[in-house]
């Protein structure tokens, strides 16, 4: 009998730099509820997290940074080439992550769940999955991604890759192998094919990010954008954004590896678009573009409320908006919606702070709203 009745659970794994998170987000666009177990492990050892004190007791205070948080890079250096120390750390963290995963799945409204975990096969989680999907990339591609995206040296990238279990072992255990060394579109096509094979038709397109879904608000409709809407989204942003950078459909296609898009229409005319993502239970809205000829007090709340609704369905704890000056000036709208301007360091929860710092760009202001009071990982 399934551990989670009524749920189809995909276990998603792959080594560092293979692009597991991109594939997870693709599955979210198709209707799945995504869980990043590796991010949950970071939350577990954060200050105030359930594993914080135990890790500190075992490994010592020298792993702390100046703000009292566990410095994950220092901790990694301790366990990196020490299998016994790594096993000790995992014995503390893994049970708490599995409890959090169980909690998220049980309270999710989606029929299909995807659990992303680099050590899925080494944990007991894989036993509860209906299928195992492994993401593969060539070593050269892995190294290039680590150097480019994480800013580490080629030597460190090779060391991290060599320290992990072989990709061949993960492939041997998989029902589905996604080769993620080519274009985003090539990977998307592989994911769609596997989705249709392993997910029942009645379970598809049920998630809050499922492409093609739409919501009616009077004479306004909000459409969930998907890869087939790339040119339309690029045209909207190019037409209404103040940026001098011109986007192509390929740019938007690549962006689907990170975020979702909502398209606002009046009748058949597209009048706005919002680009946002939910990662580590934090919602981040980085793109809001509106036709300047439409009343902002009518359209802006509709877009934000629809983003919030989908974020709550994805169990987000907080919503972060990154606003340019022309939107910041609408103080009453933001007040009525429950947002307030905040510096990143004031957010209190490490995961919220890290998300804010990661997405901040010059010239934007951060607005914050807490969406949930109850948190998945809390102190014991």
Image (cartoon, rainbow, N blue to C red):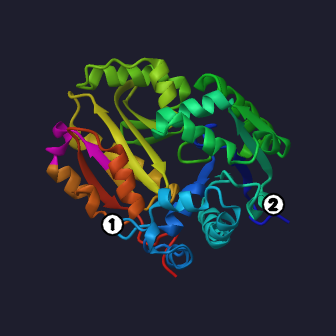
Whole-percent x, y for residue 116 in the image: 64, 50
Q: Residue furthest bottom?
A: 380
Whole-percent x, y for residue 259 in the image: 47, 39
Whole-percent x, y for residue 68 in the image: 37, 71
Q: Which residue is mark 1?
A: 66
Q: Is residue 149 left or right of residue 295?
A: right
Q: Residues within 10 Å of mark 1 (few under 14, many from 20)?
A: few
Q: SS at mark 2? A: helix
Query: What residue is shown at x 61% (from left), y 51% (from top)?
Result: 33
Q: Which residue is mark 2?
A: 127
Vertical side of 359 occupied by 269: above or below = above
Q: Which mark is residue 362?
A: none
Displayed quadrant of residue 109 = bottom right
Front of the two marks 2 and 1: 1
- Give the quarter of the figure containing the N terminus: bottom right
Query: What residue is shown at x 27% (from left), y 26% (from top)?
Result: 241
Does the rendering let one see residue 27?
A: no
Foreground: 169 or 6? 169
Displayed quadrant of residue 15 = top right
Foreground: 363 or 267? 363
The residue range painted magenta reads 321-330
């Amino acid at each position: 009998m399934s551990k989670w009745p009524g749920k189809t659970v995909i276990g998603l794994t792959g080594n560092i730099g293979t692009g597991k998170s991109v594939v997870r987000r693709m599955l979210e666009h198709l209707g799945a509820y995504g869980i990043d177990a590796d991010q949950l492990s970071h939350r577990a050892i954060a200050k105030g997290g359930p594993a914080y004190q135990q890790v500190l007791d075992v490994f010592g205070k020298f792993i702390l940074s100046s703000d009292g948080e566990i410095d994950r890079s220092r901790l990694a250096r301790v366990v990196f080439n020490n299998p016994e120390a790594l096993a000790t750390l995992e014995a503390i963290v893994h049970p708490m992550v599995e409890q959090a995963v169980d909690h998220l799945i049980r309270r999710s409204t989606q029929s299909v769940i995807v659990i992303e975990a680099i050590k899925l096969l080494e944990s007991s989680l894989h036993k509860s999955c209906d299928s195992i999907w492994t993401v593969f990339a060539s070593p050269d591609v892995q190294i290039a991604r680590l150097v480019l995206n994480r800013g580490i040296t080629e030597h460190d990238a090779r060391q991290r890759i060599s320290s992990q279990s072989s990709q061949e072992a993960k492939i041997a255990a998989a029902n589905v192998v996604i080769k993620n060394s080519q274009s985003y579109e090539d990977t998307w096509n592989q994911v769609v094919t596997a989705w249709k094979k392993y997910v029942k038709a009645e379970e598809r397109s049920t998630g809050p990010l499922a492409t093609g879904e739409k919501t009616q608000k009077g004479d306004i409709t909000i459409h969930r954008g998907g890869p087939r809407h790339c040119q339309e989204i690029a045209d909207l942003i190019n037409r209404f954004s103040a940026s001098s950078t011109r986007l192509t459909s390929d740019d938007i296609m690549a962006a689907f590896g990170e975020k979702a898009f909502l398209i606002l229409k009046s009748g058949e005319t597209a009048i706005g678009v919002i680009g946002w993502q939910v990662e580590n239970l934090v919602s981040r809205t980085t793109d809001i573009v509106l036709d300047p000829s439409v009343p902002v007090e009518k359209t802006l709340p509709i877009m934000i409320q629809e983003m919030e609704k989908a974020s709550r369905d994805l169990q987000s704890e907080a919503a972060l908006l990154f606003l340019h000056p022309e939107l910041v000036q609408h103080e009453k709208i933001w007040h009525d919606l429950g947002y307030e301007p905040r510096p990143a360091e004031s957010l209190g929860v490490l995961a919220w702070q890290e998300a804010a710092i990661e997405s901040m760009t010059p010239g934007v202001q951060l607005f914050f709203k807490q969406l949930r009071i109850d948190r998945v990982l809390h102190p014991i």
